[in-house]
Image (tube, rainbow, N blue to C red):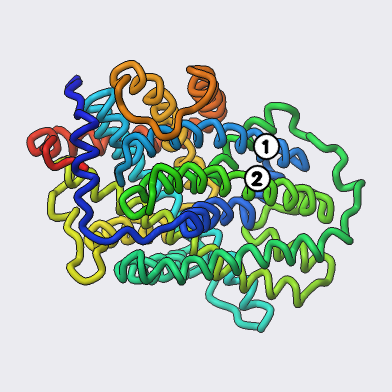
Amino acid sequence: MNSKRIDPRLVLRNAQKADHDRTLGLFDLTILGVGAIIGTGILVLTGIVAAEDAGPAVTFSFLIAAIASGLIGLCYAELTTSIPNSGGAYVYSWVTLGQLPAFFTGWTLLGVYVATTATVANGWTGYLKSFLQEFDILLPASLLVPAGAGGIVNLPAVIMILLVTVLLTRGTGQSKFVNNCLVCIKLLIIFLFIFVSVRDVNPSNWHPFAPYGVRGIITGAGTVFFSFLGFDALATSAEDAKDVQHTIPRAIVYSLVLSTILYIIVGLLMTGVVKYTRLNVSEAMAFVLLSQGHRLAAQLVSAGAILGIIAVVYAFIYAGANITKAMSRGGFLPSHWAKLNSHSGSPNRALWIIGCLSALLAGVFDLHYLALIANVGSLIVFFIVSLAVILTRRQYPALERPFKVPGGKIIPILSMGVCLLLLVNISGAAWLTYLIWLVAGAVLYGLYSRHHVDLKQQG
């Protein structure tokens, strides 16, 4: 195995070569994190996981996933502030483990962001369908369901992803305003759901509270962990962030805390209003409202979800393009993929690569399956990030650390343990798909990447 590590001082020097002005402040970063975290998880997966895995105890599944995310978020905060770079975990892996692990970390991240984008877009179609049905507009069922679930193609999801990609090619400075507005709309419809549904709670629906036992709760946590992936997208925004050493750690903490509170409240309300066995639908929040006759509220929620989920797609295409850009700079992918547009300052080629791949997956594969695939890759990456905190302290003790995870090695070790616990509860089918993705990466590395690696250009 090629263990050649990259000097973090080189990464820092290259990261300071700003090709465009930094545009993201603390508010923008927090909104970016919230926009990525609060999306398909709260609007779609809450109902599905309650029905299939955890029952009303889905709230505990969210809590476990939130604790895991918090531990990992602290590890990310230390690494992001000491090695600010758009490559995120891919660069941390290269700094601590070497060239080959770095490639597979980056390759895994690309798979995670593409699969996550596709999953979110799948859930978005459900809300679009629900919204249009309220106006007696029926779209052909075969064009709303991915090929993997019996349809022809999930056409709305494909179109939405491509339109978001177009928005991102305008540059973060122009597109962040649109994203901020979308996230605010999403928060408003969640508060509307809470306000309307709290009066319809029937405590008998919470019994049995954990029908699938502890294993169901843990399995549910492994699935809904996908819901918290947004905070790691913040690590890839380091080159666009103002005062990165202070803004990104705070944005990670703020977005995780707010998202966790909302997930738990919504999970309790959904399973309290409707029996968990009926919640296996992609537009769960609108379904719950309609079940109680709140047609106007359901229409508003569906409309808000249609707009709000777009913010999640925005965040993950942006993150995936940043990873593509960083890997291209390092020579693992063609160097011209990292080229920035002279007008917008955005990596348009990388954006279109991620956007088109995501659109393809969204049109073909089932939502729940895609979420599991994304979880495998993300948990492995988070394990590496937690390990990298320990390794960087040992390998580079003189490296400046504006933020340091408290408690020595305790939190990074706990973080690694939680990742392993969740990984062993993910289905074999998801593992198999992830291994196929790794094999494809190994072929790419052998034929191209190892011949073009350029340490001097990384960053």
Q: How many numbered tags mark residues here?
A: 2
Q: x and y percent of residue 108 in the render?
A: 34, 38
Residue at 70%, 65% in the rendered image: 286
Residue at 30%, 22% in the rendered image: 398
Residue lying farthest left?
A: 451
Residue at 24%, 31% in the rendered image: 8
- Please say if the residues under marks 1 and 2 sit with CB atoms less than 8 Å apart: yes
Q: x and y percent of residue 103 in the render?
A: 24, 34
Please give left or right for residue 79 compared with residue 459 in the image.
Answer: right
Q: x and y percent of residue 440 in the render?
A: 25, 38
Q: Residues within 10 Å of mark 2 (few under 14, many from 20)?
A: many
Which quadrant would residue 443 be assigned to in this image? top left
Regarding mark 1 in the picture, which secondary structure is present there? helix
Regarding mark 2 in the picture, which secondary structure is present there? helix
Residue 225 lies, with reference to residue 247, above or below; the image says above
Which quadrant would residue 326 be assigned to in this image? top left
| Residue 445 vs residue 433, the one in the foreground | 445
Q: Which mark is residue 63?
A: 1
Query: What residue does disc 2 label?
Result: 260
Look at the image and tell me whether residue 149 can be seen: no
Q: Residues within 10 Å of mark 1 (few under 14, many from 20)?
A: some
Please give left or right for residue 51 compared with residue 147 in the image.
Answer: right
